[in-house]
């Protein structure tokens, strides 16, 4: 019943998604080779855009999320803008925060809140641009600030170049820092870098300066074979520790369910494989369908979390199942200690095979097989679909006939009904008989 109820909910969510009118959706969705919001066009909702190129020249009153090879925002965005592209150019004002990830990013318009940079090659903030609060960077190559930043500049960057005004502090990890002529830093300058910052004579740093030397990222010596072997062993031990901790919690909390799920590889191997392949494909699609709807978001998060948890615990489930396949009856017990010992042996073997440095994508294919088996065993044990039918315990039994010498003699009365013979019938005269 629980499985049928879940299937009905998933089907109903997809059906409602197909029938929902555009007004009931939570955002404006645009996808295609080229997505264009023309000048003068207004979108009074969130905008999600994906394509080869995205050009937003109109106005979006709420948030914008775009992914393309090239994104240009020349119109106004009333909320936040999250842009992922090879080249990004922002010429229109952003009322909220601007979050970017890409190759080249150029900002020439004011940003009302934060500028968040993740993994960009180069980022340029022109003199005409302002950032209302902080600039936060993680993994950027080069950041050039020629405009005004009203908050702090913090994070990690390869090269930081400041030619404008920073009203807050600068607190970064960098390979190189340059403060150009005409720049002004009103707060502190704290940085971790291989060498001191280059500060031009015409630059002003009003706060304290603090330099923490560190080795350059490119100065690392090449690893030897021993170093690689030690790294491999440490990685295996770390991942094995994670798996053992997760498996121990699973056995302590759900011992009977764990025992039943790990028996599926022996009882119903083919249904387990088929259900595993189906779960690996269907669950992500159902999660995406539910995420688009408003009412389906909690169900989507619950479904995705359960799916990911079972997928990670597949190495534990398959490890126990392989040990229980051995011709040793003591490994098939349901006690927690027995399950834990089987988990310890089986998970270690699974993880060692997975971490072997073999070619042809060995790690990926082995992990895929383990994930399919784990999902299939869990689903088969939970639903019962594909299990062999149990033998009925109420089959009729044959009753042995009663011996003739123990049968009670009966006489026929005049009405034709049998009646028991009296005990003194043997004493009657022969004539009455």
Image: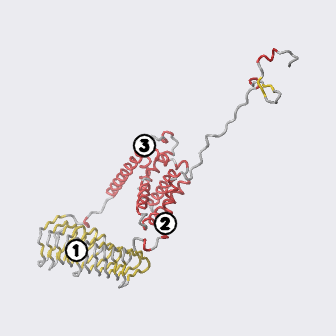
Depth check, mark 3 against mark 2: the one in front is 2
Sequence-wise, the earlier of marks 1 and 3 is: 1
Secondary structure, mark 2, is helix
| Mark 1 crowd level (few <14, some 14–19, many ≥20, 10 Å Cα) | some
Residue under circle 2? 14
Q: In this view, does 183 lie above or below 424?
A: below
Disc assigned to residue 132: 1
Q: Nearer the viewer, residue 74 or 245?
A: 74
- CB atoms of marks 2 and 1 within 8 Å: no
Which residue occupies 57% across, 52% down? 386
Of all residues, the one furthest to the right in this rendering is: 431
406 left or right, relative to 43: right
Depth check, mark 1 against mark 3: the one in front is 1
420 left or right, relative to 325: right
Residue under circle 3? 341
Which residue occupies 54% across, 48% down? 266
Secondary structure, mark 1, is loop
Q: In this view, does 370 lie above or below 345?
A: below
Q: In this view, does 67 lie above or below 364?
A: below
Quarter placement of the C terminus: top right
Q: Where is residue 425 in the image (x, y as percent from the top left)?
A: 80, 18
Q: Nearer the viewer, residue 65 or 202?
A: 65
| Mark 3 crowd level (few <14, some 14–19, many ≥20, 10 Å Cα) | some
Calculate the distance from the C-alpha at mark 3 to the C-alpha at mark 2: 43 Å
Which residue occupies 32% across, 74% down? 81
Disc assigned to residue 429: none
Sequence-wise, the earlier of marks 2 and 1 is: 2
Secondary structure, mark 3, is helix
């Amino acid at each position: 019943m629980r499985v049928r109820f879940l299937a009905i909910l998933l089907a109903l969510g997809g059906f409602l998604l197909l029938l929902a009118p555009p007004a009931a959706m939570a955002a404006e969705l645009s996808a295609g080779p080229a997505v264009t919001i023309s000048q003068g066009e207004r979108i009074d909702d969130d905008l999600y855009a994906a394509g080869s190129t995205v050009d937003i020249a109109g106005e979006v009153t709420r948030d914008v999320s775009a992914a393309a090879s090239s994104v240009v925002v020349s119109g106004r965005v009333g909320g936040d803008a999250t842009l992922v592209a090879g080249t990004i150019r922002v010429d229109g004002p952003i009322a909220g925060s601007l979050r970017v990830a890409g190759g080249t990013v150029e900002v020439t318009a004011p940003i009302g809140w934060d500028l968040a940079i993740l993994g960009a090659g180069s980022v340029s903030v022109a003199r005409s641009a302002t950032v209302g609060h902080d600039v936060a960077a993680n993994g950027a190559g080069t950041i050039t600030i020629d405009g005004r930043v009203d908050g702090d500049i913090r994070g990690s960057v390869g090269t930081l170049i400041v030619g404008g005004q920073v009203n807050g502090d600068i607190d970064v990890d960098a390979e190189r820092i340059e403060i150009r002529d005409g720049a002004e830093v009103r707060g502190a300058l704290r940085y971790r870098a291989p060498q001191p910052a280059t500060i031009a004579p015409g630059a002003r740093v009003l706060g304290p300066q603090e330099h923490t030397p560190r080795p350059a990222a490119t100065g690392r010596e090449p690893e030897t074979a021993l170093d690689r072997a030690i790294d491999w062993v440490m990685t295996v031990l770390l991942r094995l520790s994670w798996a053992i901790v997760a498996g121990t919690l699973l056995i302590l909390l759900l011992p009977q369910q764990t025992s039943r799920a790990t028996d599926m590889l022996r009882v119903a191997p083919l249904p387990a494989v088929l259900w595993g392949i189906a779960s690996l494909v269907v669950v992500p699609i159902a999660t995406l369908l539910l995420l688009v709807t408003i009412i389906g978001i909690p169900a989507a998060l619950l479904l995705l979390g359960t799916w990911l948890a079972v997928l990670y615990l597949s190495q534990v489930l398959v490890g126990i199942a392989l040990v229980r396949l051995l011709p040793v009856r003591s490994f098939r017990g349901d006690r927690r200690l027995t399950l834990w010992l089987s988990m310890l042996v089986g998970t270690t073997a699974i993880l060692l095979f997975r971490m072997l440095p073999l070619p042809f994508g060995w790690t990926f294919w082995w992990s895929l097989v383990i994930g399919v088996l784990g999902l299939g065993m869990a689903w088969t044990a939970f639903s019962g679909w594909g299990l062999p039918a149990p033998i009925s315990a109420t089959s009729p039994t044959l009753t042995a006939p009663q011996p003739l010498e123990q049968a009670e003699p009966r006489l026929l009365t005049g009405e034709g009904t049998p009646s028991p013979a009296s005990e003194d019938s043997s004493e009657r005269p022969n004539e009455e008989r």
